[in-house]
Every structure is written in C-alpha cells, then in structure tokens.
Amino acid sequence: MKSSEPSSPERAFQDALKLLVARDYTTAKMREKLAARGFNEAAVEMAVVRLEGEGWVNDRRFADRFAETAVACGRFFGPRLRLEMRRRGVPAVLIDEVLGRLRLEHDEQDDLRCVMERRFPDFSFFAASDREKRRVIAFLQRRGFGLGTIMNVLKIEGIE
C-alpha cells in the first residue's frame, strides 16, 4: 500500500527499485541517491536494509561484476580501478579482496597487450613519433597501468 508521506520507507524502497532498473548500486551509493531524492535518514536506512535482505543490493556482487567488467573491457586497471571502485562506494575491505583476486587471475602485461591490440592495432613503438608515444603511454597510464609495465610491453617486447 502506497503512503502519501514523501519520506516513507516503502516509497524509498520503490524509488530504489526504479533506480536499480537502470544499473546496479552499492549500499553507500543507494543511500546517497535516496537522500538526494529527499528521503529522511530513517526511511533511507530501512529501504537499504530491505534491499540488502531481498538481494537487490549486494556490495560484493557489485564489486566483483564491476571489476571483472572493467578489466575485460579494458577500461580500468590497478590504481585506477581501485579509485573507480572507491568512487562507487565499494568498502575498502572488498576492494582489497577483489583486486587481490584479480591480480592472481589476470596478468597485467597480457591485459595491456589486449588493450593495445584493440585500441592501437597498428602502433609500433620504434616507428612512432615521440608525440605518438607520449599519447599512447598517457592513455595506458590513465587506464591504470604502471609505467614499468607499459615500457616493458611497448619497448622491450617491441609492440609492432
């Protein structure tokens, strides 16, 4: 039964479900979103507890999916992935756990090679101008790859 009170827990829960149709959220981000919509703290907390209890919001599931997708799509790696997860409200303990697992499952050099093949298939480090090298290296660093790994893959292995 809908309540006419704008800050009711039921209304907060219904608004949260509408938000979840478009994308997944962490509990922290869901609290933010509901508070921004004008719900009081008690209504937000009750809605979030219900969402967690019914399995609609799960920080671990969010962290696993977000990290796997980010790495698989070549969007974020290493420190940048940590930053993006933190921005989305993933608890620090979960970030450490998920990134630790990813480090065991993925090789940074292999991931960098995949990004290079997709993004810069015709790039040759030895034939490129200094400007082009800086552009490619900066792109890879923004994605979160370490400079040592970048230089190792591009220069020593001679991506051509």
Image (spheres, rainbow, N blue to C red):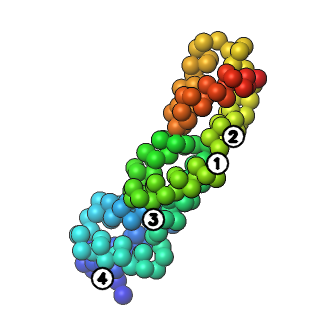
Which image quarter holds the C terminus? top right
Labels 4 and 3: the sequence-earlier one: 4
Residue type of the residue flagged with mark 1: His
Q: Secondary structure at mark 4?
A: loop
Real-space CA distance between mark 2 and mark 3, rounded to the nearest whole angstrom: 28 Å
- Crowding at dot 4, Cα within 10 Å, few <14 / some 14-19 / many 20+, comes out as few
- Crowding at dot 2, Cα within 10 Å, few <14 / some 14-19 / many 20+, comes out as few
Left or right of residue 105: residue 36: left
Res. 157 in view: yes
Q: Secondary structure at mark 2?
A: helix
Q: Position of residue 94 (x, y in %)?
A: 45, 60
Residue under label 4: 3
Labels 2 and 4: the sequence-earlier one: 4
Q: Out of 153 and 64, give the one closest to the viewer.
A: 153
Real-space CA distance between mark 4 and mark 3, rounded to the nearest whole angstrom: 29 Å
| CB contact under 8 Å: marks 2 and 1 | yes
Q: Position of residue 84 (x, y in %)?
A: 45, 47
Asked if residue 106 is positioned above or below residue 135 in the image, the reply reads below
Of discs 2 and 3, which sits in the foreground?
2
Q: Position of residue 140 (x, y in %)?
A: 57, 31
Residue type of the residue flagged with mark 2: Asp
Of discs 1 and 3, which sits in the foreground?
1
Which image quarter holds the N terminus? bottom left
Of discs 4 and 3, which sits in the foreground?
3
Labels 4 and 1: the sequence-earlier one: 4
Residue under label 2: 110
Residue under label 3: 59
| CB contact under 8 Å: marks 2 and 3 | no
| CB contact under 8 Å: marks 1 and 3 | no
Residue under label 1: 106
Identify which residue is drawn at 54% across, 33% down: 146
Real-space CA distance between mark 2 and mark 1, rounded to the nearest whole angstrom: 8 Å
